Image (cartoon, rainbow, N blue to C red):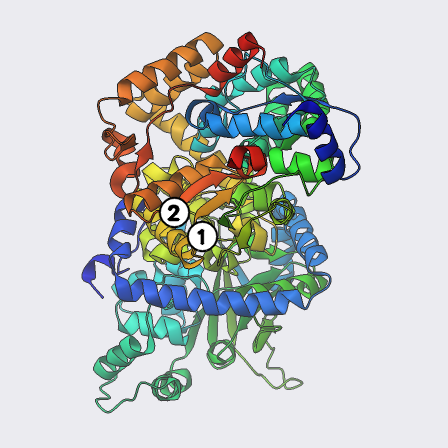
Amino acid sequence: MGGLVSGVGLDPKTAPTFPVAAKMALGDTQLRKNVRHATDVIQAKRARVVAEMPDWQALREAGKQIRQHTMENLDFYLEEFEANCARAGGVVHWARDAEEARRIVVELVKASGSDEVIKIKSMTTEEIQLNSALEAAGIHAYETDLAELILQLGEDRPSHIVVPALHKNRHEIREIFRREMNLPELGDQPHDLADAARMFLREKFLRVKTGVSGANFLIAETGGVCIVESEGNGRMCLTLPETLITVAGIDKVIPRFQDLEVLLQLLPRSATGERMNPYNSVWTGVDAADGASLGDGPRAFHVVLMDNARTEILADEEARQTLHCIRCAACQNACPVYRQTGGHAYGSVYAGPIGAILTPQLQEMHHAQSLPYASSLCGACYEVCPVKINIPEVLIHLRNKVVKQNTAGVAGLFDVEAGAMKAMAMIFRSERRFRAAQRLGRVAESPIAGSDGWIRWLPGMLGGWTQVRDLQEMPKETFRDWWERRGRNGD
Amino acid sequence: MDSERRLNFVCECSLPSEASLRVSLFITCYNDTLFPETGKAVVRVLERLGHTVEFPAGQTCCGQMHWNTGYQAEAMPLLSRFVDQFREAEAVVAPSSSCVAMMRDHYPKMAASLEDARLIAEIDELLPKVFEFSEFLTKRLGLEDVGAYYPHRVTYHASCHGLRNLGLGDGPVRLLKAVRGIDLVELPGLEQCCGFGGTFAVKNADVSGAMLADKMAAVLETKAEACTACDNSCLMHIQGALHRQKTGVRTVHLAEILAGDEEVAR
């Protein structure tokens, strides 16, 4: 795979615009084949396990209600979570932004006396680029999820929320393992690769004293944290270390333990097409080693609750539903745009439709402004979303925000697209002007139309159309002219 | 076909139809300008079924392009314009599912944001009377057989707005199945977007082109002579590539197939 589409350093602040990055990704045959194959397989599995649920639509609605209710009362549930987590022996830290979250985690790791950590797959720590911050502080992080390990050893970045190395096939993975684990004889069968990863990781699980995780859900009622996973590496990271540090966005909270009944049906079926995740872990505080208990699990447990622009999203009534996301990635698998480009083109750890609405908002609309336009608004994402986030609606809302930004002030007067849009709007406000524009259009296009009535080249922005398509010349008579002629002739 | 023959024909082929309706045609801006044949076909089908067609002359555009591209302020005035033009309609028919979806999904919200109580009420009253063309036939009139004849091999592309926003389901396919002489063949990957997406086709021309390549491959696989849909926007996009590649396959709006009869074929 060419260096051009490598995800190294995925950062919305510096990433190229989506059309530019997508163009590079589209040229990578292997990448497109891998992404297509993987999303086809997951979609088929999802469709099978969703079809067997007679109450799927009711479940989706229940999921939406739980998430909506939580967001409307987020301050209350966060404080409830903090109180209950502390009661169970955990320590809750609040981080305003990525910087603060990184600093807190680095300090906590140092305080634990370790210069290494084992990590469970966590998009939140990817969002804040925690591993680089740890490295800079002299702390080495070992990713223990197979896909994350592949990315870490390959110096790559995630391209999918649930299966982050989906852009790699097993032959490419073998090359990475051969090189990085010094295993020249390694085979390319799935069990060969899994064995190699297991041997590599087992030693880390037993040695490293500090673990870092994300969270799927924070349960306000109990102060517990829930993580679901497929490989058992998560269970290892949650139980073996002496110190466990969980980093979670404030959007991850849910009110009651009972809400998991709904969410743990929706999540695995939408994410991996499984009825249930192989490993479902819920841990609550620390086990007081008072002789009455086994003294099992971590001695110290910290939760870092991170805002990082989430309260900004919460304040925007129309975009608030973005925070309902439970990170299943069903929208990515279903998205015809993502399926062509893969995840790196989005320049963010959150790719696909959810990334197109989440990423620019996490950047407070200062970066990633091309992402709300990275959609044909086909609605496949909304159709599969387990908590019914109307992604097309939010995309349109964010496009409006982008336009408002770009057309504000003097610079807006020189914006070609805005000028054209405003002119069109003026034309549509009057029948007379509309008819004049129809006539003018016919005159204007006549020099570029071929003798056969087809246009093969268009100027400026419209040139995108004629890259791969012809355009038929406008007919000599509009419908309304025909209608009037017909009325006059009385036929 | 003289009027008596037409009347007999309609009585034979249509399902229980009610008395003649006064149908207001919302042609939509791009059909008016680029696809007048579709409008003529809608008129032909509706009149053949015994209904009266009206065309409010002041109509222009529903505002979809502006709204979906982020120019909400520019779309707003088109809302009251639409209401002014169609307020008196018994039924409004538009041969474009994306324009109908624009109105159904966004007009109530737009009216609410303008805080205009009268406009909100008028939109509320008008929207249930607005139909996409195939939807009008199948859901409002309860028809499947509209007396069409079209002796060609055809495949049907379900446009995203018709499929997901309007929930047209198999309505258009049932209409096509009832067409005499047609050789209807199913399009593989029916639910996949063709990659048009309005300004998406120029803003993200490369991705749009990649999606279009998939759709074109599916169309060619059917060995159809023509690809049809309820939206000329998707068809303009698909046809653009079919023509560029000199495939010899054409696109045709569903209304133009349903307008076909022995007379047209001759």
Nearest the eye: B22 or B201 = B22
- Placement of the N terminus of chain B among the 4 image quadrants: top right
- The amino acid marked with disc number 2 is Val
Residue linked to disc 2: B249
Q: Which residue is drawn at 38% across and 24% down?
A: A475
Is residue A100 visible in the rendered structure shown here?
A: no
How dense is the environment of label 2, judged by Cα within 10 Å: few (below 14), some, or many (20 and up)? some
Q: How far apart are marks 1 and 2 (CA)?
A: 7 Å
How far across and down, in percent of the image, does residue A168 sit? Answer: 32, 70
Q: Which residue is drawn at 52% across and 11% down?
A: A484
Label number found at residue A95: none
Vertical relation: A233 (above or below) A481: below
Nearest the eye: B160 or A71 = B160
Whichever of labels 1 and 2 marks the residue nearer the N terminus, that label is 1
Left or right: B136, with B42 as reference point: right
Is residue B179 visible in the rendered structure shown here?
A: yes
Q: Are marks 1 and 2 in contact (CB under 8 Å)?
A: yes
Vertical relation: B133 (above or below) B174: above
Vertical relation: B61 (above or below) A283: above
Left or right: B263, with A8 as reference point: right
- The amino acid marked with disc number 1 is Ala
Q: Residue at x 59, y 14 (%)?
A: B56
How far across and down, in percent of the image, does residue A411 sit? Answer: 28, 21
How far across and down, in percent of the image, does residue A279 sit? Answer: 56, 77
- Chain letter of the residue beneath label 2 in the structure image: B
Secondary structure category for the residue under label 1: loop
How far across and down, in percent of the image, does residue A324 sit? Answer: 58, 50
Do discs 1 and 2 belong to a common subunit?
Answer: yes
Label number found at residue B224: 1
